[in-house]
Image (spheres, rainbow, N blue to C red):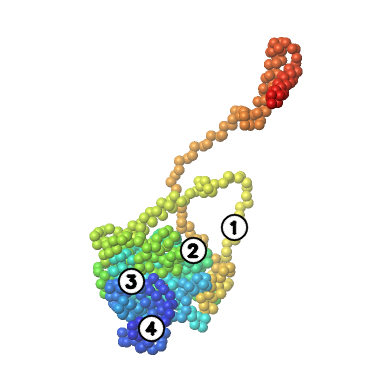
Amino acid sequence: MRPVGSKYFLEEPLGRGATGTVWRARQRETAGAEAAVAGQPGETVAIKVLKEELASDPDIVMRFLRERSVLLRLTHPNIVRVRDLVVEGDLLALVMDLVEGPDLHRYLRENGPFSPVGAALLTAQIADALAASHADGVVHRDLKPANVLLRQYGGQMHPLLTDFGIARLADSPGLTRTQEFVGTPAYVAPESAEGRPQTSAVDIYGAGILLYELVTGRPPFAGGSALEVLHQHLSAEPRRPSTVPDPLWTVIERCLSKNPDRRPSAENLARGLRVVAEGIGVHANSAQIAAAENVGALLLPDPDPAAVPDTPGAADPTQVLPHGAGAVDPNAATSFLPHTGAGNPVGAADPTAVLPTNRGGAADPTAVMPPVPPGQAGQYGQQGHRSGGPEEPHPWQNQLRAARDRNEQTQVQQYLDPDEDPLRRRPQRQVARPQPQQPPQRQQRPQQGPPQGGYGQGGYDQGGYGRQPQQRQQYAPQQQQPQRYAPPPQPERPAREPRQPRQRSANPMKIPGLGCLKGCLFTILILFVASWLIWELSPLQEWIGTGKSYWQQLGDIVDTVSKWIGDLGGNSSGQQ
Ligand SMILES: Nc1ncnc2c1ncn2[C@@H]1O[C@H](COP(=O)(O)OP(=O)(O)OP(=O)(O)O)[C@@H](O)[C@H]1O
């Protein structure tokens, strides 16, 4: 058992993330006054031992120490409590409460999506945690299911948000200098992806993605590479699944607004989600249904969002704690960029990227950043700008722009009118087909009285986060999904010249001569007729003076030839 400081020892690893390894550990002695929780000898705790690369970076150690008070003071029923921080030699460790239970990512993978009510209630608790931390000026910045632990007791699940402050640690100038990054592509807010100023609204975006994933089982934006995913965060609209009720979709859409100012505050999000959960539950009354349908009015933005320090344009880098990272730099494109776990599609399982990776290739979703060419690491000064040329964009910006340009081109080229598409065009049969019957429009939920049925077995009133019903779908979306991906307008094509009708050959019967049986027979016939005519009509018979008919003469000739051939055969055998 490995000691950590003088107060703890590690027992067994619980899991490994991008920033370090989490261990089940035990307290040896009561911690000192600097710890938030003194603890008792023998008590079980979880300890996240940060990676050596982080621990050996003096910038990170400094920040770790500065952030101590922030990390230790964050207490909320839905936040994993940080009990102590240990700095010893090359070891940095966070001592936390041990949470017995899976993380939300694993839970989702093993159990499938939640019912809309369950998803709304669980996300409401996460929003509670965010509201508390935002009020304290702390932005999580890496919200994802893997960072939500589920404490299970008595058939209930209690979500706890963890990894607060890790993104802040990894924002160290030491890391940005070498172009490393923090974040997870599937959950990165557009403003983070673009390196614009960030506020607590990035966590609301993360909560929106998480909520979407809870009800559908997957995040809204996926792709073959992390860059593709980032691009979607910037420009694509989430597709509405048919299983998501209107009020819940309103919440998701608002959280996923590209404009951070349109996203609700964490507090309003929590309130809105609870109203939605009530209104879409099996026993909702008409007032609750109406309230859920008007949830949009509750989702007011935060008038004073917490700024993320040290990001470009951040209002006040010292608002939370003093940082030694220098002045706000508008050229700092982004100091926290995503990477993902190899082998996975870009998505939920992706660990937070903090350290540089050299993994490349199209199939590798970790390939967000170009690997830092040897000798270039360190070219970037604090906040990610090049010390030799502060005006130059961060290479990641170029990558993103290039990807965007590529995508735009591809889009234009990809869209092809099916009539123009030679692969899809089929001969058009003029057969009158019966028009397909439109399925009868699903009845909208009645405005009065409780709805018939609910959202899966674990509805709100059953007090759990029930699973998504697989077949039973009680609530059809009231509107068709708006057409969001309209094909780009096609440039007008010049009208095609009408084709000349095919000219049929003047000679309908082909007489190609040799090689064609019909032609051969025809030729032989012509020769026969011609020779017969010559024989009968020409003075040939007289010249020969025999007076024989054509056929007799022909027979004679054949006899002569066969005799001649017979003689030839006889001669040759006689000579032998
Ligand atoms: N306080 C805790 N109690 C119990 N298990 C924990 C605790 N904190 C983390 N774990 C578990 O340890 C594992 C690793 O956690 P960690 O936070 O390092 O990984 P992650 O969140 O998946 O990665 P990343 O660092 O990329 O966010 C996870 O499976 C998580 O469930």
Q: Quadrant of residue 52?
A: bottom left
Q: Quadrant of the C terminus?
A: top right
Q: Residues within 10 Å of mark 3 (few under 14, many from 20)?
A: some
Could you say whether the residue bearing mark 3 is in a helix, strand or loop? Answer: helix
What is the distance, in whole Å, between disc 1 and disc 4 at their CAs?
67 Å
Residue kind at label 1, given as amino acid type: Gln
Residue at the spot 29% in from the left edge and 69% down from the top edge: 174
Residue kind at label 3, given as amino acid type: Glu
Of mark 3 and mark 1, the one earlier in the sequence is 3
Residue at the spot 47% in from the left edge and 68% down from the top edge: 213
Q: Which residue is mark 4?
A: 9
Can you see residue 149? yes
Q: Which residue is mark 3?
A: 53
Q: Quadrant of the N terminus?
A: bottom left
Could you say whether the residue bearing mark 4 is in a helix, strand or loop? Answer: strand
Q: Which residue is mark 1?
A: 438
Determine contact: label 3, label 2, CB under 8 Å.
no
Viewer-side label of 3, 2: 3
Determine contact: label 3, label 1, CB under 8 Å.
no
Of mark 2 and mark 1, the one earlier in the sequence is 2
